[in-house]
Amino acid sequence: MQQPVAVAAIQFNIALGEVDINLGKARAALTRAAQFGAKLVVMPEMWSSGYDYRRLREHAERTPDVVEEITALSSQLGLVVVGSLPLLAEGNIYNTACLVDNGAAVGCYRKLHMFSTMGEDRFLSPGEQLLVTDTSVGRIGVAICYDLRFPELFRKMALDGAEIICLPAEWPKPRQEHWRTLLRARAIENQLFVAAANCCGIQGKLDFFGMSLLLSARGEVLAEGDEQDCELFATFDPSEMSEYREQIRCFHDRRPEIYGTLL
């Protein structure tokens, strides 16, 4: 991360099972984000279809075409884009965050932790590896929604050099305080930037509160959404992260010989 980066988080009410409607919303929001000068944009979890389990395989089979369109749009608009979708691979369906950088696919992350409380493990397969990769806006790590409750994943990404964590989510009420607290904790304890995009509105029996967040490496709220469709913007300045890491030397003062290394 050489220069300050203009970042946007997109939140919208995902139309359950309506890929064309959601793609239209994403297309319009990405265009607006680019017009406001954003270079990195994060979208919600399963943004193309939501958790439409009854037709999940159908939506997953369509995902390559959706990703192709978003990839072309990222090239046209000059964006790095992260958002998760259902993707079919090796006969399994994965909740997959595709990371595209100015028209190039630079990585895919399959959600590691299945939210068994809502039956996610019955319909989706877990991934087997994390993703931290270099992009045109800096070194990015990716996590998805429920992953937020597993701090060891975020520490491993930080140790692998992540400067920005991008986190698509479908995080419902009434757990909005957990959402806000855990996101800030992940930024503070790892001294890095966090861009988290949640959905909003009602899907079936679930009510999603939005509250997408852009956080500094100190855990300060740079921008926060409300409960409506919106795009929020902030600038991530690497010099602020470097200064904070010099002031409070958490990584230097670690004692891995006592509590073990993260493999």
Image: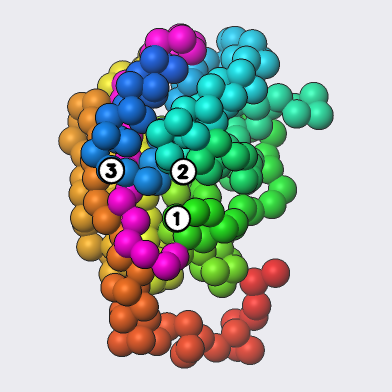
Residue 2 belongs to the span the image colors magenta: yes
Answer above or below: position of 118 versus 51.
below
Q: Mark 2: give few (<14), some (14-19) or many (20+) Cα within 10 Å.
A: many
- The magenta stretch is 1-21
The Cα–Cα distance between marks 2 and 3, rounded to whole angstroms, is 12 Å
Q: Disc 2 residue type?
A: Val
The tag on residue 137 is 1
Q: Residues within 10 Å of mark 3 (few under 14, many from 20)?
A: some
- Residue 73 in picture, x, y percent from top left: 47, 28
Say whether residue 261 is left or right of residue 36.
Answer: right
- Work out how far the residue at label 1 is from the one at label 2, CA to CA, in angstroms: 8 Å
Asked where in the image residue 156 lies, by quadrant, the reply is bottom right
Residue 137 in view in this figure: yes
Looking at this view, is 23 or 200 the one in front? 23
Quarter of the picture holding the C terminus: bottom right
Q: Which residue is mark 3?
A: 37
State if disc 2 and disc 1 touch (CB < 8 Å). Answer: yes
The residue nearer to you, when weighing 200 against 195, is 195
